[in-house]
């Protein structure tokens, strides 16, 4: 075999080695899954978690409002009045007489749990319809959604369902309309503030970042 043939064979072998190295590298490099469209499952999950913040903020606003009411009107009212009324749905009128104890604590947990469920709706709406909107536009959209949820909850569902099941319409009658509306608005506004915490950011390996 002459020198020229040896050089050609060596070049072919080197090319084959490089090809084998590339194939091995491709096999060992991990592939990172990324969503191809709107990641609804992720946003539903983050909305569920972030809804707790909205519920906690709206509950805190009601507690402060009850304390202010006591100071202005001189009429004693349980700071957790909202929870008392909220518990009339499963417990009926007897819930209004519960002032302390584990029942109110359970009521607070149920309230937070309800907020987490509504958080799914709000996060899906925010991420689906206002991903590139300004803060003011998001605030407007969420305000409309909050009032719509209030109207549907109170006058579309509870106004007939609670009397049908428990014989009384305590939630709609005992919660002033403006308190109910503000409670839902505070929840929605809080969701606007915490909404960025639930955005999906694809993982980027160090090699891709550089």
Image (cartoon, grey):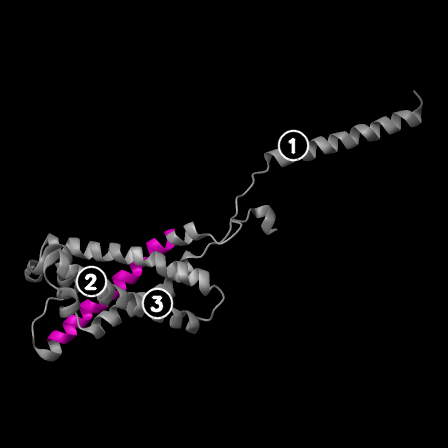
Residue 145, numbered label:
3
Disc nearest the viewer among 2 and 3: 2
Q: Is residue 5 above or below residue 189?
A: above
Horizontal arrangement in the rendering, residue 42 relative to residue 21 (left or right): left
Residue 24, numbered label:
1
Q: CA distance from mark 2 to mark 3?
A: 18 Å
Q: Residue furthest top?
A: 1
Q: Quadrant of residue 150?
A: bottom left
User: In the rendered structure, which segment of residues is drawn in magenta?
Assistant: 45-70
Secondary structure, magenta segment, majority class: helix
Q: Quadrant of the N terminus?
A: top right
Name the residue nearer the viewer: 21 or 155: 155
Disc nearest the viewer among 1 and 2: 2
Does the image show residue 103? yes
Helix, strand or loop at label 3? It is helix
Horizontal arrangement in the rendering, residue 23 relative to residue 104 (left or right): right
Q: CA distance from mark 1 to mark 2?
A: 63 Å
Q: Which residue is mark 2?
A: 158
Q: CA distance from mark 3 to mark 1?
A: 53 Å
Residue 67, numbered label:
none
Does the image show residue 87? no
Residue 29 lies, in percent from the top left, at: 59, 38
Q: Residue at x 88, y 25 (%)?
A: 6
Mark earlier in primary sequence (2, 3):
3
Name the residue nearer the viewer: 33 or 72: 33
Helix, strand or loop at label 1? It is helix
Residue 165 lies, in percent from the top left, at: 13, 56
Magenta stretch contains residue 181? no
Q: Residue at x 22, y 70 (%)?
A: 180
């Amino acid at each position: 075999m002459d020198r020229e043939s040896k050089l050609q064979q060596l070049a072919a072998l080197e090319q084959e080695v490089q090809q084998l190295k590339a194939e091995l590298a491709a096999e060992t490099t991990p592939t990172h899954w990324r969503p191809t469209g709107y990641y609804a499952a992720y946003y539903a999950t983050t909305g569920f978690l972030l809804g707790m913040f909205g519920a906690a903020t709206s509950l805190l606003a009601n507690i402060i409002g009850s304390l202010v009411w006591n100071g202005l009107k001189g009429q004693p009212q349980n700071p957790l009045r909202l929870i008392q009324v909220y518990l009339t749905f499963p417990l009926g009128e007897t819930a209004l007489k519960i002032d302390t104890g584990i029942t109110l604590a359970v009521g607070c947990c149920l309230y937070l749990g309800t907020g987490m469920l509504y958080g799914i709706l709000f996060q899906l709406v925010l991420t689906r319809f206002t991903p590139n909107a300004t803060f003011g536009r998001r605030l407007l959209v969420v305000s409309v959604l909050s009032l719509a949820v209030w109207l549907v909850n109170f006058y579309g569902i509870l106004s007939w369902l609670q009397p049908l099941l428990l014989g009384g319409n305590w939630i709609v009658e005992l919660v002033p309309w403006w308190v109910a509306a503000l409670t839902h608005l505070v929840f929605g506004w809080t969701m606007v503030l915490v909404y960025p915490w639930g955005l999906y950011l694809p993982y980027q390996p160090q090699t891709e970042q550089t």
